[in-house]
């Protein structure tokens, strides 16, 4: 089995145990794989997500998102998964 598939499965399993608000933020990143930090906060606030920065940081600390230079992205293995199989349903 491919490494990206195994690692993606682990990430998605963690995502299934998120709170409703955390799932909304994670789904946002499934649709927008890599987003500038300011844009992500503005978009999530427009969607009615309270404490978007705190939720993003929680997702980063749990390995569900990665912090780049002024952006947030899905982890590499999940990006590969999406490019091959499309966005997963969580």
Image: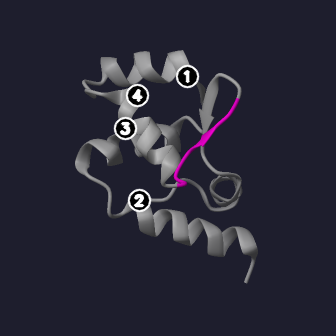
Q: Are marks 4 and 3 in contact (CB under 8 Å)?
A: yes
Q: Residue at x 36, y 63 (%)?
A: 16
Q: Is residue 68 left or right of residue 90?
A: right
Of badges 3 and 2, nearer the viewer stands 3
Of badges 4 and 2, nearer the viewer stands 4
- SS type, badge 3: helix
Q: In the figure, residue 54 lies in which quadrant?
A: top left
Dot 4: within a 10 Å radius of its alpha carbon, few (fewer than 14), some, or many (20 or more) residues? Answer: some
- SS type, badge 2: helix
Q: Which residue is mark 1?
A: 37
Dot 2: within a 10 Å radius of its alpha carbon, few (fewer than 14), some, or many (20 or more) residues? Answer: some
Q: Which residue is mark 4?
A: 53
Q: Which residue is mark 3?
A: 55
Tell me which label, 3 or 1, sits earlier in the chain. Answer: 1
Foreground of the two, 21 or 84? 21
Q: Classify 31 as above or below 81.
A: above
Dot 1: within a 10 Å radius of its alpha carbon, few (fewer than 14), some, or many (20 or more) residues? Answer: some
Q: Which quadrant is the N terminus positioned in? A: bottom right
Foreground of the two, 85 or 65? 65
Q: Are marks 1 and 4 in contact (CB under 8 Å)?
A: no
Which portion, as a residue range, is magenta? 63-68
- SS type, badge 4: helix
Q: In the figure, residue 28 lies in which quadrant?
A: top left
Instruction: In the displayed orientation, state which residue is furthest to the bottom.
Output: 1
Q: Are marks 3 and 2 in contact (CB under 8 Å)?
A: no
Q: Position of residue 42 (x, y in %)?
A: 42, 15
Q: Residue at x 33, y 45 (%)?
A: 22
Q: Which quadrant is the C terminus positioned in? A: bottom left
Q: Position of residue 31 (x, y in %)?
A: 51, 39
Q: Which residue is mark 2?
A: 15
């Amino acid at each position: 089995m491919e490494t990206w598939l195994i690692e993606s499965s682990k990430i998605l399993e963690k995502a299934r145990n998120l709170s409703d608000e955390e799932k909304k933020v994670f789904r946002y990143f499934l649709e927008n794989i890599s987003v500038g930090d300011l844009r992500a906060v503005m978009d999530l606030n427009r969607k009615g997500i309270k404490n978007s920065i705190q939720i993003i940081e929680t997702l980063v600390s749990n390995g569900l998102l990665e912090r780049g230079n002024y952006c947030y992205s899905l982890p590499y293995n999940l990006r590969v998964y999406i490019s091959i199989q499309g966005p997963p349903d969580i």
